[in-house]
Image: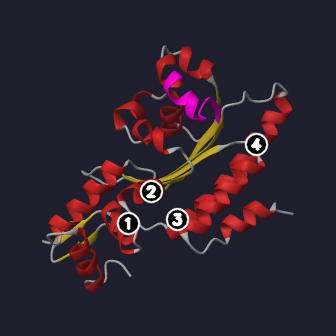
Amino acid sequence: MLRQEYLSVLEARTVEDLRSGIERFSTSLGFDRVVATMVFDRPATEPEFVSLNNIPAAYFAYFDDAARATRDPVAQHCKRSAVPIVWSQETYTQVDLGDLWEEQAPFGFANGIGLALHMPHGRHFMFGVNRALALPLDTQEVTRAVAEVQLFAVHACEAAARLIRVERVHSDGVPLTAREVECLRWTMEGKTAWEVGRILGITERTAVFHVNSAAHKLDCASKHQAVIKAMRLGLIH
């Protein structure tokens, strides 16, 4: 019988339901931090990222740093392969990137299990559970945990693909990115830029940038005017 966590995340009706299910699974497996990211590659444009996570606010600056991600051995492994990676400090030090580990370890990213599901049409689902404590020395216990993460990721990916829309939305011939639409949607719900950043796994500055960019494209003078116009155009509901 499938574990309740698998069924719960598969039946998620909202992105917040999905986020809660992902966090419950991570906690039940003994991991404090979890990151689940849908990546949508676009020809001739920057990829779109939508991340659900419970990372500390102080870690956002590291997490949202694209240049850092290009150096991170775990991120690069997941980018290239569908094989799960069990990682620790040694994963970083053996490629002379111990400085990256030293930066992230205080935030609960010292050891973990990560993987990626690569799907057709440039879609990818990156999933990782992380913690400060070392992983068990018992290899069978670690193998079971990896199997749990793999199976759960398949269910979470199915729900994420259903709930997260990242197509570019056009208004009067001007495209809004999925991230801009998401930021406007949460602004409509009364969230501050900090809260929007927390929800989407980006920095407060990045959230402000996306809202301002959307307002500019919609020819609006403020975020409130942009929200009203986006609602009128049917871009957000």
CA separation in Å, label 2 and label 4: 24 Å
Q: Which of the pair 85/29 is nearer the observer?
A: 29
CA separation in Å, label 1 and label 2: 8 Å
Instruction: Say which residue appears at 53% left-offset and 38% top-offset.
Output: 78
Instruction: Say which residue appears at 41% left-offset and 54% top-offset.
Output: 197
Q: Earlier in the sequence, mark 1 or mark 2?
A: 1
Q: Earlier in the sequence, mark 1 or mark 3?
A: 3
Q: Secondary structure beneath disc 2? A: helix
Give the answer, above or below, for where 39 lies relative to 66.
below
Q: Earlier in the sequence, mark 2 or mark 3?
A: 3
Q: Give the labeled residue for mark 3.
A: 161
Give the answer, above or below, for where 138 lies relative to 203.
above
Q: Is residue 73 left or right of residue 61?
A: right
CA separation in Å, label 4 and label 1: 31 Å
**From where the camera sits, is residue 121 visible?**
no
Q: Which quadrant of the rendered structure holds the N terminus?
A: bottom right
Q: Secondary structure beneath disc 4? A: loop
Q: Earlier in the sequence, mark 3 or mark 4?
A: 4
**From where the camera sits, is residue 7 visible?**
yes
Q: Is the C-beta separation of discs 4 and 1 under 8 Å?
A: no
Give the image location of residue 172, x and y in percent: 15, 77
Give the image location of residue 125, x and y in percent: 53, 52
Q: Give the labeled residue for mark 2.
A: 200
Q: Is the C-beta separation of discs 1 and 3 under 8 Å?
A: no
How many residues crowd mark 2 within 10 Å: few (<14), some (14–19), many (20+)?
some
Give the image location of residue 59, x and y in percent: 47, 39
Q: Give the labeled residue for mark 4.
A: 30
Give the answer, above or below, for where 200 lies relative to 75.
below
Residue type, mark 3 in image: Ala
For the residues carrying marks 2 and 3, which lies nearer the camera in this image?
Answer: 2
